[in-house]
Amino acid sequence: MDADRHIAGEPETAEMVELLLDLADRIRAHSESVSVGFDLSVPQATALLSLERPIPMNELATALRCDASNVTGIVDRLEDRGLVERHMDQADRRVKQLVLTQAGRELRSELHQQLCSDLPTAADLTVGLRRLGDLLREMQAHA
Amino acid sequence: MDADRHIAGEPETAEMVELLLDLADRIRAHSESVSVGFDLSVPQATALLSLERPIPMNELATALRCDASNVTGIVDRLEDRGLVERHMDQADRRVKQLVLTQAGRELRSELHQQLCSDLPTAADLTVGLRRLGDLLREMQAHA
DNA sequence: TATTGTTATACTCTATAACTATA
DNA sequence: TATAGTTATAGAGTATAACAATA
């Protein structure tokens, strides 16, 4: 294999980029496929997953890595489906705390479970699951 | 650390999912950031990267994992900027072969280079770059 | 003055369905 | 009949800028 006799630097990095982008793409495809199964867009599903406990709109925008103006619409659609409620914050009346309804908590749980149970199959992670876990934890610690 | 004394099964998988989704998200954020630097959307940038050599619209849709109808608009915008051309296929007159212009080849090259040079910094991959490479190759082989 | 959330706007991506022209 | 590509349509995400209420 050519992989063993690369020259340190660009060539190896280029392959890494391809592999990582491909991995990210497959994970993305998986989570999108699961989300669609619940009639949710990826941002909507991410929002639900972010709401393990109540947070302000503000913070959700950070979690979704998008402008605050977008959160309005995303939460609107979740609220229309009875999954989320906007609660007034007593300490700061500008803030709205996002709280999952019972239906929201149930859907979030199913979503989380399905993401977990299908991912190994999707990416065929069984090969190096534990090693990958160690690596990812290491990488996250330095991120 | 708690990581060492987990019970095999769900708990570990759940952590893996979080780590993988987070990794995919950071890679996505990186490639989006680079793309935006070239005034390209992610699908547009992906299209450029897919055009190392001419391919039909058809095949680009597969590469972008989207419906063929979307490719028309994406290629339109690249063509408007003089990065891509639609060439007639002599063998099958229904087919349009997508070919990068000189400007397209140059932009593709810069894009590729910037994705490579910035990714290690973005994800702090220097930690386990080689081990990760081995793992990803392994995973891809079984995908 | 600064911040939280909303609204208005404009652009891109997305799938579905119907269409043209080829095969 | 089936396929390649386009068009029309409608819905969702995205950022920017301007706004009201509150701090």
Image: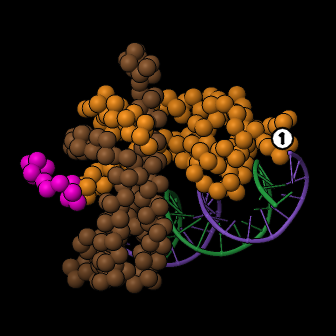
Chain colours: A brown, B orange, C purple, D green
**A20 left or right, relative to C20:** left
Q: How many numbered marks are there?
A: 1
- The correct choice, above or below, for B138 with respect to D16 in the image is above
* Front one among A74 and B65: B65
Query: Residue B140: image x %, image y %?
Result: 43, 38
- The correct choice, above or below, for A21 with respect to A43 in the image is above
Residue B82 visible in image: no
* Front one among D18 and A85: A85
Chain letter belonging to callout 1: B
* Front one among B140 and A41: B140
Q: Quadrant of the C terminus of chain A?
A: top left
Query: Residue A99: image x %, image y %?
Result: 29, 78
- The correct choice, above or below, for A87 with respect to B125 in the image is below
Residue at screen point 70% across, 47% down? B58
Query: Residue A50: image x %, image y %?
Result: 31, 66
Residue A45 visible in image: yes
Residue at screen point 86% across, 42% down? B93
Q: Quadrant of the N terminus of chain A?
A: top left
Disc 1 packing (10 Å; few <14; some 14–19; many ≥20): few
Where is residue B138, by image quadrant? top left
Residue at screen point 64% across, 56% down? B67
Q: Disc 1 marks which residue?
A: B92
Residue at screen point 55% across, 30% down? B110
Does the segment drawn in magenta span residue B5?
yes
Find numbered disc 1 in the image and state the secondary structure of the residue it sits on. Answer: loop
* Magenta segment: B1-12
Where is residue A7, by image quadrant? top left
Query: Residue A142: image x %, image y %?
Result: 23, 40
Under mark 1, the amino acid is: Asp
Where is residue C13, by image quadrant? bottom right
Does the segment drawn in magenta span residue A134?
no
- The correct choice, above or below, for A126 with respect to A87 in the image is above
